[in-house]
Image (tube, rainbow, N blue to C red):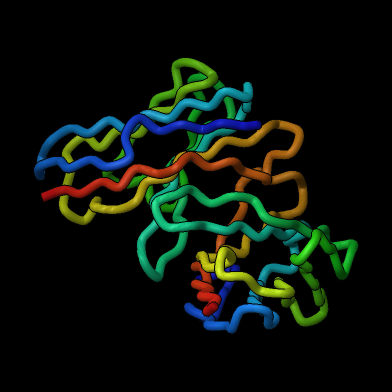
Amino acid sequence: DQQVKQNSPSLSVQEGRISILNCDYTNSMFDYFLWYKKYPAEGPTFLISISSIKDKNEDGRFTVFLNKSAKHLSLHIVPSQPGDSAVYFCAARLSGGSYIPTFGRGTSLIVHP
Amino acid sequence: DVKVTQSSRYLVKRTGEKVFLECVQDMDHENMFWYRQDPGLGLRLIYFSYDVKMKEKGDIPEGYSVSREKKERFSLILESASTNQTSMYLCASSSGTVPHEQYFGPGTRLTVT
């Protein structure tokens, strides 16, 4: 049973436009959410995170929005660049200080020049 | 900068062989993890360790074992490799103070023939 779901396996966007990657979760005990980015033949790298006490966190071109009532978060990339083409993983942590994040299955983003 | 290194980027082994995958981190992290990544399945946790000589099973431990004799090194062992263990193997580490933000190695692409 997937507790963290990324329902879109892939997303294609034109350079300069906005990319929106979505993530849904089922466990209300998750209190911290992370996004990782992975290029082919490399390990994932941490991108941005958000605590459940916030509804938005911004870092440059990347913004994560959290809607707790809907159990939904999204990653916005504006403007999208070809170098953003990668697989993006959503992850969530259980409250209580768990150090094991639960990962979604990933969304492959392709940004066309 | 945290650095997580894995002993091999690409490995080809035969069915029934014993396989060792080594992972070393240089940031004195308490926690270390082994994942495998398969298309459409995301990152699945095999084993993790929160201290030297300590280990815990993840979601898919069958067919694998681990060893952590030193804090900086975490080894994944396939006692008798099988073709269904062909995958990308990713090692990660995290600190005790920010345990859910993981730093990943570049991965080992293992092919079992």
- In the figure, A9 relative to A30: above or below? below
- In the figure, B50 relative to A60: above or below? above
Nearer the observer, A29 or B16? B16
Position in image of residue A101 (x %, y %): 62, 52
Q: Does residue A76 appear in the picture of this structure?
A: no
Q: Does residue B6 appear in the picture of this structure?
A: yes
Nearer the observer, A26 or B98? B98
Position in image of residue A70 (x %, y %): 77, 82
Residue at coordinates 53% horizontally, 83% vertically from top-left? A12
- Toward the top, the furthest residue is B70
The total of numbered circles placed on residues is 0
Is A30 on the left or on the right of B103, as rendered?
right
Position in image of residue A44 (x %, y %): 53, 51
Q: Quadrant of residue A17?
A: bottom right
Is A51 on the left or on the right of B76, as rendered?
right
Residue at coordinates 31% horizontally, 34% vertically from top-left? B8
- Toward the front, the furthest residue is A113
Is B80 on the left or on the right of A7, as rendered?
left
- In the figure, B54 relative to A20: above or below? above
Quadrant the C terminus of chain A occupies: bottom right
Position in image of residue B64 (x %, y %): 31, 40
Residue at coordinates 56% horizontally, 64% vertically from top-left? A83
Residue at coordinates 82% horizontally, 58% vertically from top-left? A51
Nearer the observer, A84 or B62? A84
